[in-house]
Amino acid sequence: MQYATTENPEYVRNAENYEEDVSTNDPSATGVKSSCLLNELAHFHMTNNCAPNIMHDLLEGVCSLEVHLVLGALIQEWHFTSDLLNSRITSFDYGLVESKNKPSTISANKIQNPDGATHQTASQMWRLVRHLPLLTGDKVPEDNEYFELLLLLLDCMDIIFAYEITTEDTLFLKHIIKDHHSHFLHLFPMRHLKPKHHLMTHYPREIRMIGPLVRYWTMRFEAKHNYFKRLGHIVCNFRNILKTLSYRQQMFLCYNIFSGKDLGERDTEVGPGSTALSLFTYVETGTKKQSRT
């Protein structure tokens, strides 16, 4: 598994070999402790139902590792410095929508030790990995092998994160995942593929089974949950944490409603003149809302 660049159909679990592993009753050899309770459902079997989370597999796994490995190699080759990289990360115009989750700066210690915590959220890594060619491309030769690894990863992500994928796309994805994994092993011979690298080899088959994987990721749920995690840390009251967080969230929602804030007020900025939101306010209240300048 640590050096496998493609999926081997002989080792893919199905209902038959799964039941054989259960009856063998040897978890150390088969990796199966007991039969899954969900298999008792009428139209469900765990071997036929897969929903990988590409946020954890890629944004918090493969992308994090390879971005720091590639940056470390490019800095070691003197294409640019960490100071220049961080300066461009902080000053780059990510656009109106993506500016809310700008990537954090990357310390020299993190570049030297790419394993472990990244200090980037999944949203920040999503922006960093896609904008990295724009941030550093002018400093790196076109035939650089380390930069090629990053571009191969982005090619994989273009299909994996797409909302519409054809069967032909999955066949192409299988080949570029193989190229990417092989190139990784070539550039970093002292390393092996991580488990999340291995999960990528199953993506083409899983997409054909259940459709685009981006429809099953947990990004939006994690973003909503982040509010409650921060709130729980602030209130420090865990006696009835569900009631506390629910009450605070509803009070926050009421505040936003009764304060009369326009929808998307934090995201847009307009000059003099009328907008759809100001027209709506005029129709509802009879008073014209002043546009921000």
Image: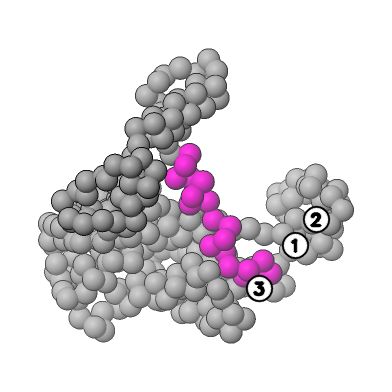
Q: Which residue is mark 3?
A: 208
Tag 3: Cα neighbours inside 10 Å, few (<14), some, or many (≥20)?
A: some
On the image, the x and y values in percent for residue 7 come to 62, 72
SS label for mark 3: helix
Label 3 vs 1, first from the N-terminus? 1
The answer to whether the residues at label 2 and label 1 have Cβ atoms under 8 Å apart is: yes
Residue lying at 22% horizontally and 49% vertically, measured from the top left:
291
Q: Is residue 12 left or right of residue 221?
A: right
Q: Which disc is residue 44 wearing?
A: 2
Q: Which disc is residue 146 wearing?
A: none
Q: Locate the N terminus and report the quarter of the image it occupies.
A: bottom right
Magenta range is 207-225
On the image, the x and y values in percent for residue 50 come to 67, 59
On the image, the x and y values in percent for residue 52 come to 59, 58
Q: Which residue is mark 1?
A: 48
Image colouring:
one colour
Report the Cα–Cα distance between label 2 and label 1.
7 Å
Tag 2: Cα neighbours inside 10 Å, few (<14), some, or many (≥20)?
A: few
